[in-house]
């Protein structure tokens, strides 16, 4: 394996009886060894403990417990942003060009492929998320818009929004061959697609015809067509009631359809203008949005009855869920509405709050996508919000009055977001996988930690020099901390005092006028950049005020000596509340 190339990391986890262990959350780091000798279990435990604790010790070369942020831009490209280690001038990990601007996207369950619909060129882009290279631009039918990937990943379903009725319906793509498996004519107008949880049936709305088409997935054939409300615009599936819910814009009716029999179970009345309908994570409740009335409607899938009607932002058009809240994006407001999920089971009024996500209202930008502009964070206790008018991505933590930080999108209008989690994920029973870009040549420990059941081990990995890669410049400076404490206090100044040694001469590095210090709160939600002040004999100082409790990373750069932030190993320290 060569430095700078991509590699798949896999761990098979079984118990003593060889039975696969499911639903685990292992943590993994790559750390370079100083010698060829294998690391014993004691040193391995010490390494892992240092990775978990804030300290000024050298960190692991590669942390496999991170994520990337993907922004679908109004321009025909996708920004790939690394909020952790994309320093040294830019967090832009990659920029993926498209033939035309994207409307919707979906990522495969193994996180290896990204599919993006491009209505202007009647194609769907297939992108390798390991290399960030285009695999193919495949035929997507007439005006491919909404995408839906089966749970088993076998077929990609594409809604063909042909307003003239020439080929309006769905195109089905075999994800192995990337060839058209079927084109099914369903009706004219815009289409939304939903699949049952067993992938047996697909339900497709036909907005202009006022119908829903039912397709047998195994036969790839139309089996029924149902009349629903006027101008059906949105559809969702509830795993609790095993029913399909179709929201109609023309009359505001939500039609409940039995997913097995195709029979209409109930009609739930709201108001004309309904545009978006989604199920809560447990599928017990549904949430529908009406941008015409600026309202949200909550209904019970167990009884098929309306529970609440709430005021939301102007033109509300998108819904995102975390464990605690439903988030509603409104293009006519810079504020995002939060609805507390725990209140839905109660008869009393539902708690509604909001927070600002930018300076401008999203509709000030021409950017629009079917995909969500608000997505949950990796920890599930907050959201990332794309504001195309600001050309920014905001990070919000639940319980705060405003976003805790932001990411630039480098003068591009982000209209939708995805989170590509690089941590190990279970692909099949007991097999946990992720993909990495191999670090520089050398011998490494692959440090593995599992909390429950407790398991610690360091596997050996050798990475060879890549003959095709340019030679990197060695860093000749060593940054030695002079603080005894690694704990700061929230909203109090903390002084970073350190000594810089020239490793070539082993002498203090004096008069570094461009010694930059970057401090950021993991995972990149707040940062401060500044220049350290020299106090003599190679000693420098700078200070920062931590805005909140958490783990902070400290990086250094000296441009005059060609030392960049991403060439230095970070210190870490912890900030606590008083």
Image (tube, helix red, strand yellow):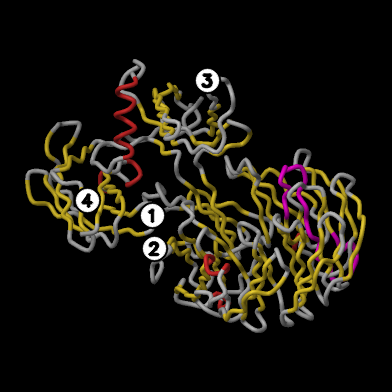
- Element type at marker 4? loop
Q: Which mark is residue 16?
A: 3
Marks 3 and 2 sit apart, C-alpha to C-alpha, by 46 Å
Q: Residue furthest front?
A: 347
Tell which tag, 4 or 1, sits nearer the viewer. 1
Q: Which mark is residue 500?
A: none
Who comes first in sequence, dot 3 or dot 1? 3
Between 533 and 451, the one lying in front of the other is: 451
Q: Residue at x 58, y 31 (%)?
A: 431
Does 164 appear in magenta? yes
Left or right, 460 with respect to 507, comes to: right
Left or right, 489 with respect to 361, comes to: left
* Magenta-tinted stretch: 148-169
Q: Which mark is residue 515?
A: 4
Q: In the image, residue 145 lies at what x, y percent?
A: 74, 61
- Element type at marker 3? loop
Q: In the image, residue 317 lies at what x, y percent?
A: 63, 73
**Position above or below: 21 against 166:** above
- Element type at marker 2? strand
Does 120 appear in magenta? no
Label 1 belongs to which residue?
A: 524
């Amino acid at each position: 394996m060569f430095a700078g190339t991509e590699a798949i990391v896999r761990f098979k986890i079984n118990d003593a009886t060889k039975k696969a262990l499911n639903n685990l959350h292992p943590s993994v780091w790559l750390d370079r060894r100083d010698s060829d000798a294998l690391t014993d279990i004691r040193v391995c435990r010490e390494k892992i403990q240092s990775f978990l604790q804030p300290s000024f010790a050298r960190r692991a070369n590669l942390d496999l417990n991170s994520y990337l942020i993907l922004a679908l831009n109004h321009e025909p490209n996708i920004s790939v942003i690394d909020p952790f280690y994309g320093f040294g001038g830019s967090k832009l990990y990659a920029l993926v060009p498209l033939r035309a601007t994207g409307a919707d996207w979906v990522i495969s369950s193994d996180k290896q492929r990204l599919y993006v619909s491009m209505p202007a060129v009647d194609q769907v882009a297939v992108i390798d998320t390991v290399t960030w290279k285009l695999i193919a631009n495949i035929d997507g039918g007439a005006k491919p818009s909404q995408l839906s990937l089966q749970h088993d990943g076998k077929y990609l379903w594409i809604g063909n929004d042909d307003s003239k009725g020439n080929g309006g319906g769905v195109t089905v793509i075999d994800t192995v061959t990337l060839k058209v498996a079927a084109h099914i004519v369903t009706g004219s107008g815009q289409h939304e697609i939903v699949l049952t949880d067993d992938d047996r049936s697909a339900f497709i709305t036909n907005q202009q015809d006022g119908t829903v088409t039912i397709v047998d997935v195994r036969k790839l054939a139309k089996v029924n067509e149902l009349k629903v409300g006027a101008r059906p615009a949105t559809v969702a599936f509830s795993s609790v009631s095993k029913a399909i819910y179709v929201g109609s814009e023309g009359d505001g009716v939500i039609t409940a359809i039995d997913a097995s029999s195709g029979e209409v179970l109930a009609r739930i009345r709201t108001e004309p203008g309904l545009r978006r309908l989604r199920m809560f994570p447990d599928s017990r409740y549904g949430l529908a949005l009406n941008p015409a009335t600026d309202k949200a409607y909550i209904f019970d899938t167990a009884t098929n009855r309306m529970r609440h009607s709430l005021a939301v932002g102007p033109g509300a058009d998108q819904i995102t869920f975390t464990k605690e809240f439903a988030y509603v994006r409104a293009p006519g407001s810079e504020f995002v509405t939060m609805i507390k999920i725990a209140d839905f089971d109660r008869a009393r009024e539902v708690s509604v709050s909001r927070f600002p996500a930018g300076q401008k209202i999203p509709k000030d930008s021409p950017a629009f996508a079917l995909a969500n502009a608000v997505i949950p964070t990796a920890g599930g206790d907050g959201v990332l919000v794309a504001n195309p008018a600001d050309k920014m991505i905001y990070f919000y933590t639940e319980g705060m009055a405003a976003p805790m930080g932001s990411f630039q999108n480098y003068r591009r209008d982000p209209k939708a977001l995805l989170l590509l989690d690089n941590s190990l994920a279970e692909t099949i029973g007991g097999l946990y996988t992720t993909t990495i870009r191999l670090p520089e040549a050398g011998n490494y420990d692959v440090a593995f930690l599992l909390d429950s059941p407790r398991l610690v081990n360091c596997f050996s990995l050798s990475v060879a020099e890549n003959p095709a890669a340019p030679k990197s410049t060695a860093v000749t400076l060593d940054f030695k901390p002079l603080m005894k404490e690694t704990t700061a206090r929230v909203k109090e100044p903390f002084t970073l005092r350190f000594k810089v040694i020239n490793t070539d001469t082993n002498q203090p590095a004096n008069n570094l006028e461009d010694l930059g210090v970057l401090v950021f709160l993991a995972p990149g939600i707040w940062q401060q950049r500044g220049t350290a002040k020299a106090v003599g004999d190679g000693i420098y100082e700078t200070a920062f005020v931590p805005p909140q409790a958490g783990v902070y990373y400290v990086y250094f750069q000296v441009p005059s000596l060609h030392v960049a932030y991403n060439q230095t190993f970070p210190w870490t320290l912890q900030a606590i509340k008083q």
